[in-house]
Image (tube, rainbow, N blue to C red):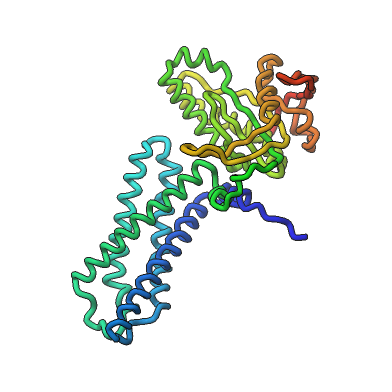
Amino acid sequence: MPKKIDYTATAQRIFAQFPFLTFLSIQINFWIIANVLLGTIMHLQTRSVGETFHLTGLGRLTPVLMVCVTIGILNGVCLGSADYYFDRKMARKQSLGRLLLLKTVISVSVLLLFFALLRFVLFDWVRSPQLASGLSPKSWEYIFYILAIYYFFMTLLINFINQVNKKYGPGVLVPLLLGKYSIPKEEERIFMFMDLKSSTSIAEKLGHIKYSEFIRDSFMDINRELLPYRAEVYQYVGDEIVVTWRVPDGLRDFCCIRFFFASEKHFLDRAEYYTTNYGFLPHFKAGLHMGKVTVVEIGDIKRDIAYHGDTLNTTARIQSVCNEYNKKFLISEYLLEKIDVNHHLKTEALGMIQLRGKTSSIGIASLDYERI
């Protein structure tokens, strides 16, 4: 029986390995499809008018499609490169409104460029013999209006796709549209609850505005480590972030463990920034566990994908006893048994902890990792 391909996991893995190419491919594929659709519609409209007025020699569809593909590739390269630059270089420094404005300016500039390319270069390639003298300036004006309106709505659509990818992660939009999460389904996943240490004292010293900036920067740095370690953010709760993995992704190469220490290293690499701006370096404590959960799309006015089940409660409980054991990273023995422990992974069994509201207990251990 052929192995079933997980579309979401594959998309996230490709995005993690080739982020720039992913930005380009999304834009290029989208604009090729959009331009081919527009070119086909305009060609059929031209043929319809030709049949009505008994015109002949109105040109073939193939050259039109080739022009559409060419412009789609060029458009995708320009806008994909801009998207990548804004996402990696300016997302922290600029507001969403300003970023959208800059992207709009670039989109309009690209539209004007390709309109000039179409009018003065490519049109001679696709026009019919009956249009030897070319189109009138008024005709080009109407064509520009058509392109402006069409590109405006297509730009809204690609921005919607990009925003969905930002909210849910790469590869989630298609399953979402197909209704994968509309009916509750059971999955086995790995969860990590990461909570900021000494958050109350830090908040008192910084004040709530500066503290919010501190949390924002901390979460942004954690986000930088998500894709390399195949992780997804489930939710943010105050000064806590909940991260999740598909079981194969989390267990492969200790990703679910190495992610925590990679985040710590990221903070250390930016120690000068944090100490200069806040006087503190972020330190997180974490609990890690694996188990079955139910996943379903919830809400109406505000929709989201939610996980339910004892696995999350257990993970939260594990994280909550970090201070009690004076440890920064705890893992359930159930998950630890699934991991092929090697000499790089240091573990210390800490015994059993009682789960709130239950008579059952769960074994936990502390973790340390020598190499990221």
Q: Against 273, is 112 above or below?
A: below
Give whichever of 302, 281 is nearer the camera: 302
Indicate the quadrant where residue 327 lies.
top right
Rendered-image quadrant of the N terminus: bottom right
Residue in the image at 32% along x and 58% along y:
110
Residue in the image at 71% along x and 38% along y:
254
Q: Left or right: 179 with respect to 277?
A: right
Q: Residue furthest left?
A: 137
The percent position of residue 100, horizontal first and vertical second, equals 35, 44
The percent position of residue 133, horizontal first and vertical second, equals 22, 81
Q: Left or right: 235 with respect to 102?
A: right
Q: Against 180, is 215 above or below?
A: above
Indicate the quadrant where residue 308 lies.
top right
Residue 31 can be seen in this image? yes
Rendered-image quadrant of the C terminus: top right
Report the label total: 0
Residue in the image at 27% along x and 83% along y:
53
Give whichever of 44, 31 is nearer the camera: 44
The percent position of residue 188, horizontal first and vertical second, equals 71, 40
Q: Against 261, is 149 above or below?
A: below
The percent position of residue 227, horizontal first and vertical second, equals 58, 42
Indicate the quadrant where residue 260 lies.
top right
Give whichever of 308, 109 is nearer the camera: 308
Residue 125 can be seen in this image? no
Give whichever of 285, 50 is nearer the camera: 50
